[in-house]
Every structure is written in C-alpha cells, then in structure tokens.
Amino acid sequence: MAIPRLNLWSLGSSLAGYLQKAGGTMTGALTLFGAPTVDLHAATKKYVDDQVAAAVAYPAPRVLAKTSGTSLDLANVEVVTFDYASPATISTFSNAVVNKTYQFRNIGSSAVTIDRTNAHLNGSANQVLDPSDVMLVVGRTTTAIIQVAPKSDNG
C-alpha cells in the first residue's frame, strides 16, 4: 500500500483563513458573548460604560465650618491619617502631625473637646493645635467622615 503524499502547498493555503494561536492578528470587529462573569473574561465597552455610570460619585470636599474660640467639641472620634505611604490610626489628638489632613469617624457618643491644652501636635507641649486655626471639611459623606485640616492649607 502506498503512503499518500502530503501537499504542503495546498495545506498552507487551506489554513490561511484561520487565526494562529500565537501571533495571530484579527482585523475585524470582535463580538463578545455577554458580560464578564470571572476575572479574566473580556468586557465590552457597554459593560464598562454601564459600570462607570453606576459608580457612586463623591461630592467635592467643601468647608462646613471654621472653628473659633478656644475649643471645638466633637463626638468621640477616631483619627486616621491620609498619609498613604505610612498610614496610621491614633485615638487622640496627641501625636498628630503638623500640616497633615486627618479623617475623623464617629465611634461613640462622648464629647471630646479640642483645646489649647489637650490638642498637642507631635506630642509636644509647645506645638498646640489652635482650634481657631482649624476648619471642618466634609468629603466622603457616605462614611460620615469629617476631615480636619489646618486653615492655612485651605484658605
């Protein structure tokens, strides 16, 4: 029995219409079956546009109040620094950092008074947070965050 000869020229021309597994190029539009259901699925432009449209847009921060006098009363708060390189959480105003912005979250109902005697910056008695130099700014209202920043940084 004779072995049939394979004509490589005709085989190559018949495979020309198929996409190569590695290095193949498609020049037409690609239609996807549906929305992605796992991490590595492709997403259509419509799916991405719908996700962007449904995203919650937080309002731009705005000044709620400038403090005055010698003290500022807040509910019991937790202080979280916005320093992304070295985030830290502190439970009091001592050891706060000069010229930083903090977010304060309400974690209780007891009042905390920020005044010249207990609001030390950097834990030093000679660097005191002056409540008249602080403003309250609201940012992400959905998480009830109050941002407190030095007045000189924000007007």
Image (tube, rainbow, N blue to C red):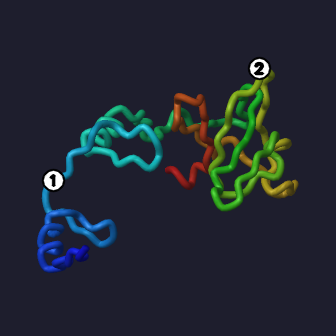
Neighbours of disc 1 within 10 Å: few (<14), some (14-19), many (20+):
few
Q: Is residue 59 positioned above or below 89 on the image?
A: above
Residue in view at x 62 percent, y 36 percent:
67
Viewer-side residue, 145 vs 64: 145
Q: What amino acid does circle 2 point to?
A: Ser
Q: Mark 2 to mark 1: distance in Å?
A: 59 Å
Q: Earlier in the sequence, mark 2 or mark 1?
A: 1
Q: Quadrant of residue 74?
A: top right
Residue in view at x 52 percent, y 35 percent:
140
Q: What amino acid does circle 1 point to?
A: Ala
State the quadrant of the N terminus.
bottom left
Asked if disc 2 and disc 1 are in contact, CB closer than 8 Å, the reply is no
Q: Quadrant of residue 86?
A: bottom right
Q: Which residue is mark 1?
A: 29
Q: Give the label on residue 109, or none.
A: 2
Q: Is residue 15 positioned above or below 100 on the image?
A: below
Asked which secondary structure carries label 2, the reply is strand
Residue in view at x 67 percent, y 37 percent:
104
The x and y percentages for residue 120 are: 81, 49
Pick out the residue farthest to the front. Answer: 1
Neighbours of disc 2 within 10 Å: few (<14), some (14-19), many (20+):
few
The x and y percentages for residue 35 are: 33, 37
Q: Is residue 151 left or right of residue 48?
A: right
